[in-house]
Image (cartoon, coloured by chain):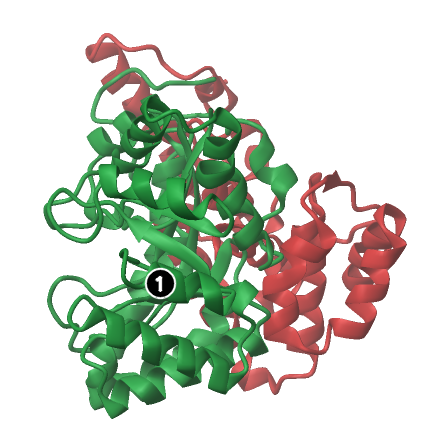
Amino acid sequence: MQLIESLVGAIARHSPAGAAWLQTEGSRFPQAFAAAGRTLGRDEISVEDCPIPWPRTGADEVGRAALVLGAVAVLPPDQHVTFVRDLLRRGEVRERHAVLRVLAGLPEPVRFLDLAIDAFRTNVQSVFEALACDNAYPARYFTSAQFAQLVIKALLTGAPVGRIHELSSRIDAELVRMVEAYASERRAAGRPVPEDAKLILQ
Amino acid sequence: MKLCDPHIHMTSRTTDDYQAMAAAGIAMVVEPAFWLGQPRTHVGTFEDYFLSLLGWERFRASQFGIRHYCTMGMNPREANDPALVDGVLALLPGYLEKDGVVAVGEIGYDDMTPAEDKCFAAQLELAKAHGLPALIHLPHRDKKRGCERTLALVKEVGFAPERTIVDHNTEETLPMTLASGCWAGHSIYPQTKMDEPRMVALVQQYGAERILVNSAADWGVSDVLKVPKTRDAMRAAGITDATLAKIFWDNPITFFAQSGRLLPADVASALTVDQRQLHEGNSVLRGQTPRVD
C-alpha cells in the first residue's frame, strides 16, 4: 500500500469528516498544513499497513504528513529540499514532528539528510524523538558517526533508545566505545547509568 | 479563581515572574507581538521573534503550568519604518494561520501618521482574511484623539466591533470604546496608564460587560501581578466573585475563542507540568529537581 493511502486511511477510520476535509482542503497547502491541528485534532491514532515505521501519533501529525506527501508530489523535484527545509524552519513543534516522521517516505529521501541532521541538533525533545524513535530515516541514511551521535543523544536526553529503528543492526565498535565512555563518565560523577545503555553494551 | 492576563510580554520577563504568576492563580496569558524597546533593523528579526512566541515562550510558560497564546502583528511604532513594513506584512499571513495565534495584534496608532493608518488598515484586512479578532493598542500621547481615530478606522474598514479589543483605556476613552461595541482593555501600571483604585471605580460605574484587565508587563517598570492585585482590590470594594470571574477569566476566553484557535474546553483543565522537557536543547531548570505533575 502507498504511504499516503495508509495515512489517509488512518484519518478516515478516525474521522470521516477529517478525511473529507483533507480531500477538499489538501490542495491549499500552507493553510491546510497550519490548520490540521484544529480540524483533525490531536487524538492519538494508529496507521495500518504503513510502508515505513509509524507509531501511534496525533491525528494532526498523520494528516500533516499526508499533506506534505501531496504537496511534494506536485512540485518539481529540484524544489523538494527547499520546500521541506522551510517547513522545518518555520514550523511549530507539532508541524515539525509530522515532517520528520514522513521524511523516509518522500521521493529520494537521501536528499533530506542535511535537514535531518539539523533537526537532530535542534533538539526540542519531542522533535528529536520524532526523528530518533520509530523512524526509518536515521537507520537508512545516517552515516555510522551520525547514527552514533543520535544514539548517544537519546541516552543523554532520556529518549527511549529501544524505539530507535534497526538499532541492533547499526551497533558498531565505535558506538559501543562511546556508550562505554558515557557510562564511565556517569559512574565517575556518582550518577546512575541509564538502563537503556544495556541495549548497546550487551 | 483562575485568572488570565490577556496582554503581557513574557519574552521580556524572568522565570521568577512565571513562578509568582502561577502561584497567584494566573493560568493563561496572551502575549501580543510588539517592539523590542528599540527599533528592529531587519525583517528577519521579526520572523525569529514570531517563531519564539510560537515555540520557546509557549514552552517556557507550560513549564510553570501557564497556557500561552499569542497575537501576531506589526506594532504601530515600527509601522513608520518603510524599510520594514512591506516585508513584515508579507510575512504575517503564514504566521496568522498557526495554532495558538488568537488575534492580529498589537496594531493601532502611535504618532497617528499616514504610514500608521496604512499599516493599521492593512492588518485589519489581514485579520478578516484569516478569521482572527484584532487587538488594538491606543496611543499614549493624545490618547482621546487616538481613540476617536481608532474607532473611526475600525468602522471604515468594516471590522466587527465584537471581534475587536481596544486596549489601554482610561476614564476618557472607555465610554466611547464601549459605545462602539468594541471590547475594552485596561492596562494596570505602577505609575502610568491605569491603576487599581481607578479600575475598581470604572467597573462600579460601567459593569463587567466587554471589560478586560491586563498588566501589559514588558521590559519597563511594570508588574506581572497587576491582574491578581486588581482582582483583590475589586473584591475588597465589594464586587462579587461572579463579576470577578467574568472580568478575569470568562471575558478573555470568550473574546479570544472567536479566533477558533482557543477552545474553552482546552483551557478548562489545569495544564500538566513536566519540567523534564527540553526546548531546543534548553531546559528552564538550572540544576533544580524538575517538577513533574
Chain where mark 1 sits: B
Q: Identify the residue at horizontal 37%, vertical 70% (top origin).
A: B73
Can you give x and y, in whole percent of width and height, for residue A170 in the image?
52, 40
Q: Is residue B270 above or below residue B97?
A: above
Viewer can see residue B11: yes
A188 to the left or right of B201:
left
Q: Is residue A72 above or below residue A122?
A: below
B200 to the left or right of B183:
left
The part of the image, by quadrant, that contains residue B214 is top left
The part of the image, by quadrant, that contains residue B80 is bottom left
Q: Nearer the viewer, residue A135 or B27?
A: B27
Give the class, few, some or many, for how many residues have Cα within 10 Å of label 1's Cα (few <14, many ≥20).
many
Chain A representation colour: red
A73 to the left or right of B227:
right
Residue bearing the label numbered 1: B50
Q: Secondary structure at mark 1?
A: helix
Can you give x and y, in whole percent of width and height, for residue B39 in the image?
13, 72
Q: Identify the residue at horizontal 38%, vertical 57% (top origin).
A: A118
Name the amino acid type tagged 1: Phe
Which chain is green in the picture? B
Can you give x and y, in whole percent of width and height, for residue B268 in the image?
59, 32
Q: Nearer the viewer, residue B132 or B68?
A: B132
Can you give x and y, in whole percent of width and height, for residue B89 in the image?
38, 82
Q: Is residue B100 above or below residue A123?
A: below
Q: Identify the residue at horizontal 85%, vertical 50% (top origin).
A: A15
Q: Nearer the viewer, residue B246 or A27?
A: B246
Viewer can see residue B44: no
B104 to the left or right of B202:
right
